[in-house]
Image (spheres, helix red, strand yellow):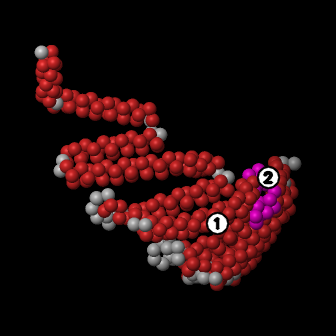
Amino acid sequence: MGPVENVLNSFLSAVPSILTALLLLLLAWVIAIIVKKIIFALIKKLNFKRFQKNADEETTVNQLDIADSASKVVYYLVFILFLPSILDALNMNSVSQPITNMMSSLLEYLPNILIATIVFIIGILIAKVVRSLTQHMLLAINFDSYFNKLKLTDGEKPETYKLSNVLSNIVMIIVLIPIITIALEALRIESVSTPIVTVLSNVVSMIPNIFVAIILLIAGYYIATFVSRLLTGLLSNTGINKVYSVLGLGDKPTSLNISSLLGTIVKVIIILVFTVEALNILQLNVLNQIGNAVLLYLPLLVSAILILGIGLAVGHYLYHLIVRYTKSKFSALIIKYVIILFAVFMTLEQLGFASSIVTLAFLLILGGLAVAFAISFGIGGREFAKRQLEKFESKINENND
């Protein structure tokens, strides 16, 4: 048997395998074409516009792009499914075996993907229904108008930023969290799903605390506003805003209203207290420590502000009083700034800013003033002291005589 006959026999023996592979390839092509057209037609018939509020021509274009992409994916997927059989028909087992194993694993895992996809789609539909119900319920009770009475912002807010829309979206996210958890567990990829499920579970467990914290903050804001207005009104009726004329400082400046200032300070303190309590409910350790530190420092800050304010008021009052009766502005300025300086040092001591340094500096300044006063008195009263000593000496001499 010659070489030509060997080649011819090998070719003839391979013809059935080649024909089988070609037939399988043709079958795959036909099925892929049919499935591609079916998928394209199905997606094209889906009415995407009803899922969007503002539907236009762009929606139709996007729908056609999605249909084309999905149909191409399915088209090539059919070829991949037929590829192991085609390679087996050509006796290329070493090449087809890895592909066969891959496809087997994919087909075994496909039900999990389908279940997770179905759960996720159903979850999205349920979440959208819940969001719609929540939004319509809030609109029915005219919730946005009540919120607008707080006057937190000026002007009309866009539809997207209305509180009813924001709250309905939050409710939708809350509904989606357990559904996403179930979908991830359906995939049975523990290395991926377990950390995400743990995080989502922690988020779900924090939701009640978050709602309580939000309610506490809202209640704190209303309470602070009510107390602030009540205190401002009471202080105004007591005539505290006339303190300028009482102290002899002239008319009250238009830029500063003491009753409103005190009311605002009380409002900020109450809101701060409620904010710290809300952080405690959320169990955020770092923020809790910061909030508690601020609350512990708050009495020192308030007392320091009172000391400084009293010192400034007394200094200005004595300045005007001394100028009125002695006509000496220089002496009045010295007394005024001494009192203010004393108040500043007391304020720094109360705030705890380098207490030892502040105390030492105050003692040095006070000692310096005392020495300066002694020296000035000594130099200025030298002649007076000389005359008194001379009188004293003359009396002694007379007594001796």
- Quarter of the image for residue 219 reads bottom right
Could you tell me how far apart the alpha carbons at marks 2 and 1 are, in whole angstroms? 37 Å
Amino acid tagged 2: Glu
Q: Which residue extends farthest top?
A: 400
* Disc 2 versus disc 1: nearer the observer: 1
Q: Which residue is mark 2?
A: 190
Say which quarter of the image contains residue 400: top left
Q: Amino acid at mark 1?
A: Ile
For residue 216, above or below residue 375: below
Q: Residue furthest bottom?
A: 140
Instruction: Assess disc 1: are there few (<14), some (14-19) or many (≥20) residues with their C-alpha within 10 Å of its C-alpha.
Output: few
Q: Is residue 77 above or below residue 128?
A: above
Q: Badge 2: few (under 14), some or many (20 or more) residues near its Cα, within 10 Å?
A: few
- Which span of residues is magenta-colored? 178-197
Earlier residue among tags 2 and 1: 2
Magenta-colored stretch includes residue 188? yes
What residue sits right under mark 1 in the picture? 215
Query: From this viewpoint, is residue 23 visible?
Result: yes
Residue 350's spot in the image, x, y percent? 46, 42
Side of 102 where 282 appears, left or right: left
Left-right relation of 89 to 164: right
* Residue at image coords 53%, 57%: 269
Q: Secondary structure at mark 1?
A: helix
Q: Secondary structure at mark 2?
A: helix
Toward the viewer: 130 or 399? Answer: 399
* Front-most of residues 227 and 187: 227
Image point (32%, 58%), residue name: 247
Question: Which residue: 42% across, 62% down?
Answer: 261
Magenta-drawn stretch contains 157: no
